[in-house]
Amino acid sequence: MAKMHRPPMPPKKGTFGRVLKMLFGYYPVLVPLAAFCVLFAAVVAAAPDVFIQKVIALIEKWYITRDWNGAAAELIPMISILVVLYIVAMLAVALHTQLMAYITQGFLSKLRCTMFDKMQNFPVRYFDTHRHGDIMSHYTNDIDTLRQLVSQSLPMLLRAGVTILSVLCIMLYYSAWMTLVILTGAIAILVITKKVGGGSAKYFIRQQKSLGRTEGFVQEMMNGQKVVKVFSHEDKSQKEFDEINMALYEDSRRAHAYANMMGPINQNIGNILYVLVAMAGGLFLVTGVKNVSFSGLAFSISIIVPFLNMTKQFTGNVNQMSQQINSIVMGLAGAARLFGMMDEAAEADDGYVTLVNAKFAPDGSVTESGVRTGQWAWRHPHSDGTLTYTPLMGDVCLEKVDFGYVEEKKVLEDVSVYAKPGQKVAFVGATGAGKTTITNLLNRFYDIADGKIRYDGININKIKKSDLRRSLGIVLQDTNLFTGTVMDNIRYGRLEATDEECREAARLAGADDFITRLPDGYDTELSNNGANLSQGQRQLIAIARAAVADPPVMILDEATSSIDTRTEAIVQRGMDKLMEGRTVFVIAHRLSTIMNSDVIMVLDHGRIIERGSHAELLEQKGTYYRLYTGAFELE
Amino acid sequence: MLKRLAKCIREFKLPTILTLIFIVGEAIIETSIPFITANLVNQIKAGAGMDEIIKNGIILAVMACVSLACGGIAGLTCAKASAGFAKNLRHDIFARIQTYSFENIDKFSSASLVTRLTTDVTNVQMSFMMLIRTAIRSPLMLLFSVIMAYIMGGALSTAFVVVIPVLGFGLYMVGRKAMPAFRRVFKKYDQLNESIEENVRGIRVVKGFSREEYEKDKFGSAAENIRKDFTRAERIVALNTPLMNLCMYFNTVFVLFIGAKLVIQNGGTTIDIGQISAMLTYGMQILMSLMMLSMIYVMLTMSTESAKRICEVLEEAPALQNPENPVMTVADGSIDFENVSFKYSSKAKKFALADINLHIRSGQTVGIIGGTGSSKSSLVQLIPRLYDVTKGAVRVGGKDVREYDLDILRGAVAMVLQKNLLFSGTINENLRWGNADATDEEIRHACRLAQADEFINSFPDGYETKIEQGGTNVSGGQKQRLCIVRALLKKPKILILDDSTSAVDTKTDALIRRGLKTYIPETTKIIIAQRVASVEDADLIIVMDNGRIADAGTHAELLEKSEIYKEVFTQQTKGGENDGENA
């Protein structure tokens, strides 16, 4: 059953490493280059402090004499170096920001494609057990959190980290005592960040949870809005919504309150630190404490002034790092969810029997052909190295098949069905009797628990899944059409089909008539699962789609349930022609749809309780008879 | 648009205004701090005594504390204001949707309404927060910094005369270029996500036709397409940083060089070292606030789309409104259609219903039959005024439906929709939608009537069985019967069943009809069905064809005169022989 909207999980250990690994894997040259540019720019960004110190020392030296020419001789080379450094730094910044824009979008695009590619290979079970909104949120919300992480947080962390380190080095170069003062302040900032930031991360995760709950409720209500109207239930659903909305408000308010406070707190710790540094500097200067430093410089105004600047820079960067906490927590939570999805096991396919174009010689021998011949054969390699070819006929048999979607509960038990090529086999039974399940097993959307299914005498487990499915045309209960023209949708059945072939298929399905009456005929654009068509019209297109594939076996699962009986009778002739020469499995609620089948199976709680033709079953006067005469309840 | 959104601030006006005030306080202090520090630096330089330094230090520390208090309070009020604003927005959107008529609902897909209520509101919330925190603060900081720089820096502040216009213009250009690029990208991005949803929904079709590789290629090229556009847009915005750096570097070099020159030439009389340091700080502040302004600009443009989508919902006028002096009682269950024509939108070329004249007496059972798209549902949806007629009039209990209070009318007309839905909650809760005050006995009675009692009791939890979202854990036929019970509990004067027993077998269907006839004889019953058997014993059967009443009469009469009815009847009763002929 569908799971509830999953809350963002707290990130697992190793998630961060995996994000980095993927990033480097996708761009093994560009990512290090960008990182290098970030580092370079960060180091250069710290350089001015050295220069400011030198310039101020210079001013101190020359301002008494007011000898500008003398000063200029020393000043100009110094400034020139600074200008050159700045130009290089700016180029580095320009390069890495452009690179990051390129890398981030490339990374997200590749990630999206990887997810999508993997998802295509997930078993149907995955889609049946996960709520579609939840799968979608991997592609929207989760990827969005990663965008923030990669494009902003990572470079920011790197830059701030390096700047802090280089500023620290420069500080130590000047004075260890002063550095100690600053470090104390930095630790205070970190402690507070951990406290406040932890609170905000906690509430941000809660906010996401509440958002999910709101989304779930709204989704349900929006879908059922018409029912709400009919029952004048507006006030009540508004009241329920307001409760959920209130909870979301509380979480959101708390999360943002913590996040908003962090800036001013850290910033002002920075300010106070500035004062402390100034006072300490003054104290050191006045008391004449001996300086400890790599440079061996004594305390002087030319040390204290740049130190004050460095204090700003240092705390500013620590501040910036701490501001990233939220987006990092969110990004990693998103990444953990993404990886969770990407690590789902793909649909196993160890089939080795493939479907090939074939030529049948008059003596009965079969040869493989590279071009489309209109005839198909199973290419069956054997363990002794020989190859055999079996013509594709559409002979399907199920032998003593057991199956359950979950282990504890069997949906099918001891089901045997034999369908000869060209036969029409029908299934009737109550909802949940296992009709659709049989078709799920035939095309291996699910694998049987016990028994055997043979296709032209070959165990279907040996057949490559894509080839097996290619040979089975299915029309499902829920019609799904894709965005594109009507023609595109029909061609989905066989991509190389010509326009004329598609039209022919539509004529067979009885869809040609209404399609030509659409504003743009076959070129009419469908959107939103064909929202502009009626359910019955959608079903007709789906039948045409299966018809153009020209498969030897067709499965029609309630394929005409939404077509009224009168229209059904009109399309019946085409349908009959479509079924001619094919093995057809029909599932229908309406008995008129299945009465002319060769064999009708009556299913009850996963067992076949009656089988035979319409006439035979009526004679048996069993369940089918009672169904037909309306004396028995199907549900 | 802004006006419409601003209305939703309501009770959070106070925190919003407080935020603005405290932010101004914070900005003032923040800009004056470098002024004090410049003093401090000069005192240290001049070798002032510790008392002087400590005095200035204390002033600074106090200022930092005040700034912290201001900033902290602003942070709290801002979080409250923005979260509250978002709450009100969601409330208003949801409330607005509750007033929608079917016509309005048809306009928006439910997925798009959900996005508007969640993602779009979150976007606007973030922008609002950014707006009240920084949109005031940044220009203020800019202004204060420029003034302070001018006061303190004198000649040095000329640097800003160059830098500010250059940066301002540069950022403006970036924003202007980025805006349309982002707008384009977001549209495409939505389409990409829609295509993923389509794929997930149709995965059985994809796999059934072995189209995995085809889908991957299709998605890959769409994603690549978006990557290109997105990269282009992001690269424009990425120009902000180097541009900003350029200005900052220019400022530093200018201040250092000219500053040094001025100090040395004048022997520190017009300008001193402390001022140089302060000028560097102000330069930084000025540039930062410009940068923030440009970020706000980009972010606002990005959220404009969201704001627009929200306003679309808020400004969508409900197509149906209560009349001024509504009629509060429905006399009986009689229904009259007088020359009714109807189309779903004024733009539609074709009328869904044309020239309908129909008179149903209170208590009658009426069957409606007709092909796919013959407007059976459209006809009955006019009765509880789910849509308004385009021409003519529909009367219930002798009065035009447009004269009734909507709740009263819909309370008297119960309708079981074709596209039926149960909501998550227990069976009991779902049934009580019909009548919240129904007694257990009433519910059981209605269930027996609709042949639902038996299967409900067969569930382990009986009436307390939880219905999962969308009602996936009951079968189609069970769901339909529960929906009928839900409608019955309203004790309506008119009951409309729109193809509501299609998944129920003929026997049960007959039992339900018999139940309705016996227990609620005075209620007018309208039954739309595919099966002739479901309507054949009705007092009046209407055959719909292409938006018109093709024929009307009793079963026997219609078998005489109606070609369509005859055809459907033979088809359904002698299906076997018919199929034989066709084959």
Image (cartoon, coloured by chain):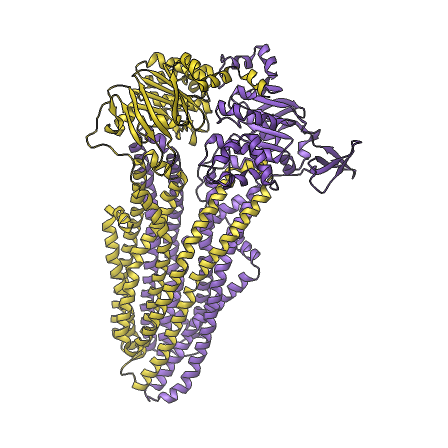
Chain colours: A purple, B yellow
Q: Quadrant of residue B267?
A: bottom left
Name the quadrant of the C terminus of chain B: top right
Relative horizontal placement of residue A2, taking residue A57 as reference (left or right):
right
Number of callouts: 0
Residue B463 higher or lower than A272, as above or below: above
Could you tell me residue A362's position as x and y percent?
Answer: 79, 32
Could you tell me residue A489's position as x and y percent?
Answer: 54, 39
Res. A319 visible in picture: no
- Quick one: B467 or B290, which is closer to the camera? B290
Q: Quadrant of residue B299?
A: bottom left
Residue B259 higher or lower than A376, as above or below: below
Residue B293 higher or lower than A172, as above or below: above
Q: Which residue is depicted at the point 36% across and 30% down?
A: A227
Q: Which residue is depicted at the point 50% across and 43% down?
A: B196
- Quick one: A381 or B382, which is closer to the camera? B382
Could you tell me residue A511's position as x and y percent?
Answer: 53, 32
Residue lying at the far left of the rendered structure: B325
Q: Which residue is depicted at the point 38% across and 86% down?
A: A71
Res. A590 visible in picture: yes
Relative horizontal placement of residue B551, taking residue B82 as reference (left or right):
right
- Quick one: A57 or B98, which is closer to the camera? B98
Could you tell me residue B42's position as x and y percent?
Answer: 29, 77
Q: Quadrant of residue A393?
A: top right
Relative horizontal placement of residue A334, taking residue A406 as reference (left or right):
left
